[in-house]
Amino acid sequence: MSPDRQAPGGIGPDDVPRLSPMFRLQWEEAQGCRVLLYPEGMVRLNGPAGEILNCCDGVRSVAAIIGELAGRFPDAATLSNDVYQFLDKAHDNQWIDYAPA
């Protein structure tokens, strides 16, 4: 899937994801990874999930995030699909929402 196509969940390339206010993303040295903190606990993120969420700043569009990650990880063949799928799950988990257009 190219970054200009809409994902099955309805996320489009021009949507601008941002971390939901009740979560905080940070590097956790003890865990050796990025974690998502919230009042009831913590979610330990794998490398790709942490990289994607780190780009969800409320400024960059999905297409810009995919472009940035493609530049950093040029050998990731399914990067676009992976980003769309992760963002759909992150939205379902209420980790992210979308900045108003």
Image (cartoon, grey):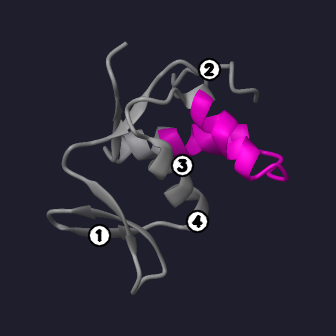
Q: CA distance from mark 4 to mark 1?
A: 16 Å
Asked which secondary structure carries label 3, the reply is: helix
- The residues colored magenta run 64-87
Asked which secondary structure carries label 1, the reply is: strand
Amino acid at the residue labelled 2:
Gln
Q: Few, some or many C-alpha atoms within 10 Å of disc 2 (few <14, some 14-19, many ≥20)?
A: some
Quadrant location of the C terminus in the rendered image? top left
Q: Which numbered disc flags the more N-terminal residue, 4 or 1?
A: 1
- Magenta residues: mostly which secondary structure? helix
**Are the two marked residues, 2 and 3, in contact with CB atoms closer than 8 angstroms?**
no
Asked which secondary structure carries label 2, the reply is: loop
Q: Read off the residue under disc 4.
A: 47
Q: Residue at x 68, y 34 (%)?
A: 67
Q: Please tell me whether residue 77 belongs to the stretch shown in magenta.
A: yes
The answer to whether 63 appears left or right of 25 in the picture is right
Q: Read off the residue under disc 3.
A: 52
Quadrant location of the N terminus in the rendered image? top right
Q: CA distance from mark 2 to mark 1?
A: 30 Å
Above or below, 8 against 74 in this view is: above
Q: Few, some or many C-alpha atoms within 10 Å of disc 1 (few <14, some 14-19, many ≥20)?
A: few
Q: Please tell me whether residue 97 belongs to the stretch shown in magenta.
A: no
Amino acid at the residue labelled 3:
Ile
The answer to whether 71 appears left or right of 50 in the picture is right
Q: Is residue 8 visible?
A: no
Q: How far across and down, in percent of the image, does residue 70 sit?
A: 73, 43
Q: Residue furthest top?
A: 101
Residue 42's disc is: 1
**Are the two marked residues, 3 and 1, in contact with CB atoms closer than 8 angstroms?**
no
Q: Nearer the viewer, mark 4 or mark 1?
A: 4
Residue 6's disc is: 2
